[in-house]
Image: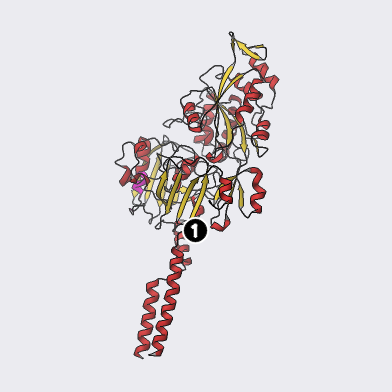
Amino acid sequence: MTNVKQILIAASIICLCISTSVISAASEKEIRIADKAGDWGYPSPYLAYARGPGYVRMQFIFDTLVWKNETNGPIPLLAENWEYLKDEDAYVFNLVENAKWHDGTPITASDVAFTIRYMKGHPYGWVVLDRVDRAEAVDKYTVKIYMSGPYAPFMEDIGGTMPILPEHIWKDVENPMDYVEPGAFVGSGPFKYADFSKEHGTYKYEAFDEYYLGKPIIDQLIYVKTGDPQMALQRGEVDLASIKSEMVDAMKEKGFIVIAGPHYWNKKLMINHNKQPLDNIVFRQALAYAINQSEFVDKSLRGYGKPASYGLISSESVWASPNVPDYPYNPEKAKELIESLGYEWDNGVFIKDKKPLKLQVLVSMIGVGGQPAPDRDGEILNDQLEKVGIQVELTSLDTKMVDKKVINRDFDLAISGHGGIGADPKILYEKTIQVPGSKPSPNTARYNKSEELNECLDGLMHEMDASKRLEAVHEAQNIYARELPAISLYCPTWYYAYNPDAGVEWFYTTGGIAKGIPIPQNKLALIGAGAGESTTAAMQKEQQESPIISFSVVMAILILVAFYLKRH
């Protein structure tokens, strides 16, 4: 009997230890991210604000067919594998078979086919489907997408950007822009929607335990609005934040990991081509000569950045042209070009038809990753343009109001900015002309006055041969720089810092998230098994590495042992 008691006592101790470890493992782990702006709309495809931070908040909830990680792309996500059928001009995707929507409904090929039909009927700002003819479910887990012609950027532009919608929810939604019911937040991503406060600019997500790549390594993800992200990080209030460039060394000394982003974001001068003299290429070239890019870098960025390419594509991109026309700072050249358009110099100001040459310039505090930054650009541009005889009316507004005015063409010049210039060169097409079937973008010049440029842009969209496409991309950049639909000013060097003790290794995505968003908040950083692997491999790895033995199994074994010893 003594042996039995000893065994039972030992069993109790073992069970207590196991239960304690289980409880400890079950304690919630939370990651908090600092953000200056706060409100980027509800994290649902049609409700998120149409800039990078809005998409990033949505991507935690909704998955795409493929994705990108720190070094590779495309990699499997909802699609286990895929192939392009050249003869049929179609893409075939084989979906993972264990993926579920957050409400427990299985994800099938019908959901993918439905998403394409739905977004063709209800245009979605991040994805243009005019090149897609149709999509059909071949079987439960195989979908075939037929193109209306060769489309080179398909994998990144559609496969890696289009959030898949649950058909059983969205089939009855007639107006997606007004749909804020709970179903609007049912996705297939690693996190479920928990809360969004528009007033406070906070977001809260909860881990989806049944995620097909394995349960996320954290339980909750929270975005916190704060006026000083860097100080919030130092005080331990958040785990990831953007930091000031001059504080990089100091933050490293404090034990934080600092990551520098590539120059895939540009500040640029938007131009209203519907107004004179801005509709004249000679005048736009005069503006380019009047602008001193290096002064912007020195004063606005305190040297932490580089002049942007006049061809839009980042000079660090594999697609960058080596022969982009340049406009070295030359105010006298700018004056000569303006005079050639019939303007006369009168006491420091150009005059035509007895009216001074005057332009309104809209400015805001827009910065990389949507983080508001002090505006110095307006004053710098004001001084540079006044030196060449152009009067300037500076108007400072919030970013969303500037975006609205640009979309409505209610402006002369506007200082704006966007990322994506290191991703697929389709960015040239998107930011130059109005893509058929798409909603107006505040970053798109909507410029179609050059047939040569239009043909070149169309070519880079259709050319499937890599070398020939590169030639088309180079030529498009060169023409763009001559036409100047917009004038890129600079590309900032942007830094984020994170607390390594929080257990998450954040990274910048190769080419940017989705279509090129240069924000180091890729959801794969929050997934343990499977980041960059096929889903099957991820599942096998998760099973092999699972360290927790079932509590009930241990109890059963111990009871059987005790019963056996008692009998014998």
- The residue at the point 55 percent across, 26 percent down is 485
In x, y percent, where is residue 30?
A: 48, 55
- The residue at the point 59 percent across, 51 percent down is 234
| Residue 545 in view in this figure | yes
Q: Nearer the viewer, residue 249 or 271?
A: 249
| Screen quadrant of the N terminus | bottom left
Q: Which residue is mark 1?
A: 528
Q: Is residue 557 above or below residue 99?
A: below
| Residue 84 in view in this figure | no
Q: Taking 149 as reference, is 269 left or right? A: right
Furthest residue to the left?
172
Q: Residues within 10 Å of mark 1 (few under 14, many from 20)?
A: some
In x, y percent, where is residue 513?
A: 51, 44
The residue stretch that appears in magenta: 105-113
In x, y percent, where is residue 19?
A: 42, 71
| Screen quadrant of the C terminus | bottom left
Disc 1 is placed on an element classified as: loop
In x, y percent, where is residue 146?
A: 39, 40
Amino acid under disc 1:
Gly
Q: Is residue 503 above or below residue 368?
A: below
Q: Is residue 123 above or below residue 155?
A: above
Furthest residue to the top?
354
Is 362 covered by the magenta stretch?
Answer: no
- The residue at the point 41 percent across, 89 percent down is 3
